Amino acid sequence: MTKEQLLGNLVFQVANSYVGQKEVGNNAGWVDKKFEAKMVAMGWQIGWSWCAIFYKLCLKEALEQYYSMPHDNSIVKDILKVYTPSVLRTVANRKEDLSLTDFTVGSAVCWQTGNSTGHVGILMTAPNNDGIFWTIEGNTSDHNNSNGDMVMSRKRSLKSTDKFKLLGFIKPRVI
């Protein structure tokens, strides 16, 4: 197993531990105030879409496990600084790592969603022969691809639509 695969598995495990976290509505906070405090500590603000902040939280906690270091570790901070509340800005920051074919469990799956700042999920399974894969995502629901109210697993496709264009995968980075 490569270092990226190990870190990716940790990202997935952290994300999976948050499945079921539910917001109170309208991107105004969460039922679980401990989870809300973690999201605020990552930079989330009331009213903001939060899928990218959720990915950053999962990556941070996975990096801390990977490096077995305290929360204020400079390596973790260095890696996290390119991840922003805007998926499109994060994609621009990591454009050299964006790929439609190079991924691992725990990779960020990035989409363009209409005129928004994008949407991101965490890869659970590699795409099958039909291009179907599973993710864990924040700010999603069964009825809205990119602006829902909880952390949940989603069935996704490599095929893009007019309103939900797959940009690619970004593997977690190990320094």
Image (cartoon, helix red, strand yellow):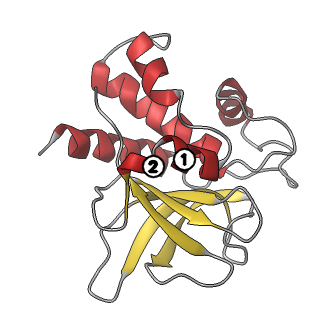
Q: Is residue 54 left or right of residue 46?
A: left
Q: Residue at x 64, y 28 (%)?
A: 42
Q: Is residue 4 left or right of residue 87?
A: left
Q: Nearer the viewer, residue 100 or 71?
A: 100
Q: Residue 99's spot in the image, x, y percent?
A: 36, 60
Circle 1 SS class? helix
Which quadrant is the N terminus positioned in? top left
Q: Quadrant of residue 140?
A: bottom right
Which numbered dot is residue 92? Answer: 1
Q: Is residue 125 left or right of residue 118?
A: left
Q: Is residue 131 left or right of residue 37?
A: left
Q: Which residue is mark 2?
A: 95
Picture layout, residue 96 above or below residue 56: below
Amino acid type, label 1: Ala
Structural crowding at the residue carrying mark 2, measured as other residues with C-alpha within 10 Å and reported as few (<14), some (14–19) or many (≥20): few
Picture layout, residue 107 above or below residue 63: below
Q: Quadrant of residue 172?
A: top left
